[in-house]
Image (cartoon, grey):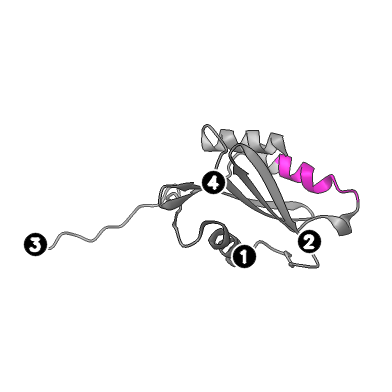
Amino acid sequence: MSELGQELAEVLGGSADGVFLYVEAGDGWIAPSVFRADGNMVRYYPSEDSAVSEILSDIWYAEPDPTKRWSVMEYVVENDKFRADYKFPDEVDVTKPDIERREAALRAHFGDRKVVYPPIEGMTEWKPSPTT
């Protein structure tokens, strides 16, 4: 778990302090979402780092009994200490990732702060033409 925190620090470009990692997992897939408060807003950090997914996969498969593996993990780093909370298949069905579950977890953790997502690469931001 501390290795996960170190890798998240890499993703965030420094310290992992203040990170909120929401993960849904199932057999053969992991869906991590990395967030951190930035003033009055929350920033989403795309998890393009395959090491994060590999570490999460190792954590998930560390439980030898497939019926006892978690479905959702919320991993938080505060004051350089981490905590992980889990939900299991009897609590939540994650046959596929669900944005609404993730958004509910975000609101529970950060309240009503605005969440900022980076622009999708290759997309153009359209702006209205100035009126003449």
Most common secondary structure along the magenta stretch: helix
Q: Amino acid at mark 1?
A: Arg
Mark 4 lies on a secondary structure that is loop
Which residue corresponds to mark 1? 101
Query: On residue 46, which mark appears?
Result: 4
Query: On residue 109, which mark appears?
Result: none
Mark 1 lies on a secondary structure that is helix
Tell me the quarter of the image containing the N terminus.
top right
Mark 2: give few (<14), some (14-19) or many (20+) Cα within 10 Å.
some
Mark 4: give few (<14), some (14-19) or many (20+) Cα within 10 Å.
some
Which residue range is magenta in the image?
54-64
Q: Position of residue 129 (x, y in %)?
A: 19, 60
Q: Residue at x 56, y 59 (%)?
A: 106
Query: On residue 132, which mark appears?
Result: 3
Q: Nearer the viewer, mark 4 or mark 1?
A: 1
Residue 109, image quadrant: bottom right
